[in-house]
Image (spheres, coloured by chain):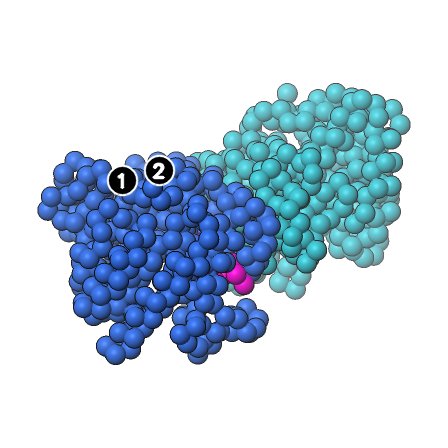
Chain colours: A cyan, B blue
Amino acid sequence: MPSVYIEIVKECPVTGARAGILHTPRGGFPTPLFMPVGTRAAVKTLSPEELKEAGAEVILANTYHLFLRPGEGTVENAGGLHRFMNWDRGILTDSGGFQVFSLGALRKITEEGVAFRSHIDGSRQALTPEGATKIQEALGADIIMAFDECIPYPADYAYALSSTERTGRWALRCVKAKTRGDQALFAIVQGGVYNDLRRMSAEYMAALDLPGYGIGGLSVGEPKGVMYEMLGAVTGCLPKEKPRYLMGVGTPDCLVEGVALGVDMFDCVFPTRVARNGTAMTYRGRLPLRNACYAEDFLPIEEGCGCYACRSYSRAYIRHLLKTGEIFALRLLSLHNLYFIARFMRDVRSAIIKGDFPNFRKNFLENWQY
Amino acid sequence: MPSVYIEIVKECPVTGARAGILHTPRGGFPTPLFMPVGTRAAVKTLSPEELKEAGAEVILANTYHLFLRPGEGTVENAGGLHRFMNWDRGILTDSGGFQVFSLGALRKITEEGVAFRSHIDGSRQALTPEGATKIQEALGADIIMAFDECIPYPADYAYALSSTERTGRWALRCVKAKTRGDQALFAIVQGGVYNDLRRMSAEYMAALDLPGYGIGGLSVGEPKGVMYEMLGAVTGCLPKEKPRYLMGVGTPDCLVEGVALGVDMFDCVFPTRVARNGTAMTYRGRLPLRNACYAEDFLPIEEGCGCYACRSYSRAYIRHLLKTGEIFALRLLSLHNLYFIARFMRDVRSAIIKGDFPNFRKNFLENWQY
């Protein structure tokens, strides 16, 4: 048995939705699962205790950022990421691929890997499949990701083909480079927006027989319909008994549709980023709390929400904090938004278990305004 | 019995230090007491629960800031400051005098009060003794302060005399304007750096027979020796059975010396402001955690400290958060510094009660480096 595996509890008879438990060395976590992002070994503004209160089970940290600062050696010397950041539940580290490719003109891709300049000090750096694996072993997350290239949108077929094949070869090199037995390595399916390349990549990765699979290179600018088509193609080719993780997706409509297409895990900065812009997420849509209409609104962000922010503070108070630049506002909104997403995922899961997911999905998408 | 009064538990036989209990409608709080500053109805970066964990009993909020944003009417409509900000212990509001006078060229003082332009939008505003009292009644703190002029340093004798006399007349107008019986009004002793004016002001205010007295206009640039001389002159003239509150002072050496001169209450942004600059306060002096020497220092901020930051995180982790701009670092340092100051005040108090304050003071001042 690998250190991380999924137990499927219930499948939707109509859609591809599944409810399960992601088993990890840090415990079993219900799926579908949303993972908050703690890029630099901290989910912005929040403490680990607050993340737990918000229902977070697995959080994501970024290899690229931690490699540059403080360096994986420091994290390793601290006793690993869990101890460094005081988080005893699950951690997943991405491979750094996505961040490195986002550097644009600052990076150069070869078969060996990617040479780039640090966005912090311009220093010359490199990441390879072997290097990214070694860094992630030093960081010590429970789930680590294979080094991949996130194909930009749009990209022509020839480029997408050669990049997808290279990502496949890189995944194999990550498998060979891996030495720790207590971490699960997930490969990342690429293929751009080409149905056949997505299937080719999924089949190639499936053949590596890894404990789980990421689906990358989506939500990078393509229309949502294209994303859903690609997702369907990929999950159709991935083994049913392994977890599927759609990377970088986190708006409620995409979460529901991703689940319907068989996805088990998601991560996204969306809930915490919009929080820091002053926006609360609710079942009725978004609440831009800086707006003047909330100046004397003494209701909680969302009536019926059990989060600390909603139990203790009014929209008027949070608006006041936002308008005066008080950091506490960002904490309250980050906490609320993560609590909202966790609650939403629990609702999705319980709809699947009750056999009511198709209805839930329909009702939600009809009423969701964003 | 007024709504706020002090019960003196023990007096130092050598110095003027006193240990007591400040009784308020929100409970009794041990003195000497340090009050964290929550300028805009929030102690920067922290939640009320964290403030309690840090040992905060009474916090300060600013009339000037809350008058401009969100406006005292909004706070009143919210049910008052305690409810607005979810704080059920003591609150003291200053009168706005200090902030208005800090505006320099933007304000004009007359016998009536102060006309000024808002630092936010340049709008024309005014504060008078009656206005400041009315605003503080709307805000609803447990202790409110009389409107005063903070005399700049240096200021000549003639100016200091006329300003101190006017502050006296203003205090009387505040007494007359006050309507709520559940709030305690403290007057503020001024007098610049002139011994006789300080005594004159203290005697004038003492004659008003208020439940407590602020000592203002100190720590505004004058040498510490001058501040201590003024303090001694003032506390010698104030009634022993009333609380004395030294405004805007909060470095540990000044706290100890203030206590030795008979002060019961202090407030200062110092602990939270230096926290946001990356500096931790400890019994051995300050720790500038951004420094490279902490990069692989896996000790807590201060060994033996029981605060959440010290129980859970290393200097290396906090330094990493500071270097990468993570807000969580500011929370951890703010919490630690307030915890440190509260612990320090408890140590001062217990030295007074044990009859050991002169020794405590000597040892502390000999070892304190800043």
Q: Main secondary structure of the magenta part?
A: helix
Return the residue found at the far right: A14
Magenta-drawn stretch contains A275: no
Residue A122: percent from the left, percent from the top?
A: 53, 63
Horizontal side, residue A292 vs residue B334: left or right: right
- Residue under label 2: B28
Q: Are marks 1 and 2 on the same chain?
A: yes
* Residue nearest the viewer, comparing A173 with B325: B325
Return the residue found at the far left: B14
Question: Chain ID for label 1?
Answer: B
Assign a secondary structure to mark 1: strand
Residue B258: percent from the left, percent from the top?
A: 23, 53
Q: Does label 1 or label 2 sit earlier along the sequence?
A: 1
Question: Chain ID for label 2?
Answer: B
- Tell me which corner region of the image, top left, top right, bottom left or bottom right, holds residue B360: top left
Q: Look at the image and tell me in which quarter the N terminus of chain A lies.
A: top right
* Mark 1 vs 2: CB contact within 8 A: yes
* Residue nearest the viewer, comparing B34 with B81: B81
Q: Which residues are magenta?
A: B61-68
Q: Residue at x 26, y 68 (%)?
A: B191
Counting labels gives 2
- Residue under label 1: B7
* Residue nearest the viewer, comparing A315 with B274: A315
Residue A124: percent from the left, percent from the top?
A: 53, 60
Horizontal side, residue B245 vs residue B182: left or right: left
Horizontal side, residue A15 vs residue B168: left or right: right
Q: Residue at x 48, y 63 (%)?
A: B131
